Amino acid sequence: EVQLVESGGGLVKPGGSLRLSCAVSGFSVRSYSIHWVRQAPGKGLEWVSCISGTSSYIYYADSVKGRFTISKDSAKNSVFLQMDGLRVEDSALYYCTRDERGYTSGRLYYYNGMDVWGQGTTVTVSS
Amino acid sequence: QSALTQPASVSGSPGQSITISCTGTSSDVDGYKYVSWYQQHPGKAPKLIIYDVSQRPSGVSNRFSGSKSDNTASLTISGLQAEDETDYYCNSYTSNNTWVFGGGTKLTVL
């Protein structure tokens, strides 16, 4: 069964750090890209970051660039989101989700959408 | 990275059709075919219902369809059913190699 399971959320003070994990089963993180998407309580979805299957392509939303770092451990079939310098506005439910895409000459040439999602892990930043 | 623009709410009666718009710019919706739509029921993770502007994943009802014209993408739901009442989000790839979601639309089935 294809599954993504997030963990690592919790309560942290402003300026603190957390490391989220996304454990994958039923497919390899080498073959799919993984995104982190967050949703503040009662608000809409916000894209945060993604890492391609080969780790060659890593991107961040402006709102987290320089503070968050995405990485993967292919041996553990897991993807991580290191969150430093946390702010109150980073409080949200964080989902990981996968997509299947292809690049040619550094350009995206196919993308099949975020087709499988985890259930999310909650991050609360508060003093 | 401004969010794509969606109407906050739309409504329709059972059996009718509704359309949700998603307006972006030449840097996202108008520049790429990588527009997708997600359905999210309360307390649940989003579900992919349309990708590549108009493609339906396996298992998604053919009552859902997508299209795009210039900088505006649209999701049409035909034959509205009570179970369609929930939130819908559009998403697009951008020229910065990032992704951006719309603000979300709440669909009410009257």
Image (spheres, rainbow, N blue to C red):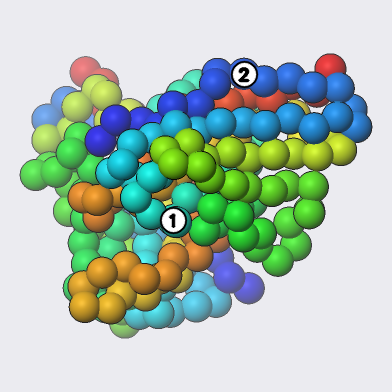
Q: Which of the 4 image quadrants contains residue A61?
A: top left
Image mark for residue B54 = none
What residue is at 58 percent from the left and 70 percent from the top?
Answer: A2
How many residues crowd mark 2 within 10 Å: few (<14), some (14–19), many (20+)? few
Mark 2 sits on what residue? B9
How many residues crowd mark 1 within 10 Å: few (<14), some (14–19), many (20+)? many
Could you tell me which chain the residue with mark 1 belongs to?
Answer: B
Answer with left or right where residue A127 lies relative to residue B35. left
Give B44 or A6, whichever is nearer the viewer: B44
Quick one: quadrant of the C terminus of chain B? Answer: top right
Instruction: Give the structural element (helix, strand or loop) at label 2.
Output: strand
What residue is at 62 percent from the left and 47 percent from the top?
Answer: B66
Residue A19 location (% of width, % of height): 25, 50
**Does residue A16 show up?**
no
Residue type at mark 1?
Tyr
Mark 1 sits on what residue? B34
Q: Tell me if residue B11 comes above or below residue A84 in the rendering.
A: above
Give B82 or B52, whichever is nearer the viewer: B52
| Residue at the extreme left of the image, as rendered | A66
Residue type at mark 2?
Ser
Give A47 or B77, whichever is nearer the viewer: B77
Q: Tell me if residue B96 comes above or below residue A5 in the rendering.
A: above
Mark 1 or 2, closer to the camera: 1
Q: Which of the 4 image quadrants contains residue B3?
A: top left
Quick one: quadrant of the N terminus of chain B? Answer: top left
Could you tell me which chain the residue with mark 2 belongs to?
Answer: B
What residue is at 40 percent from the left and 79 percent from the top?
Answer: A31
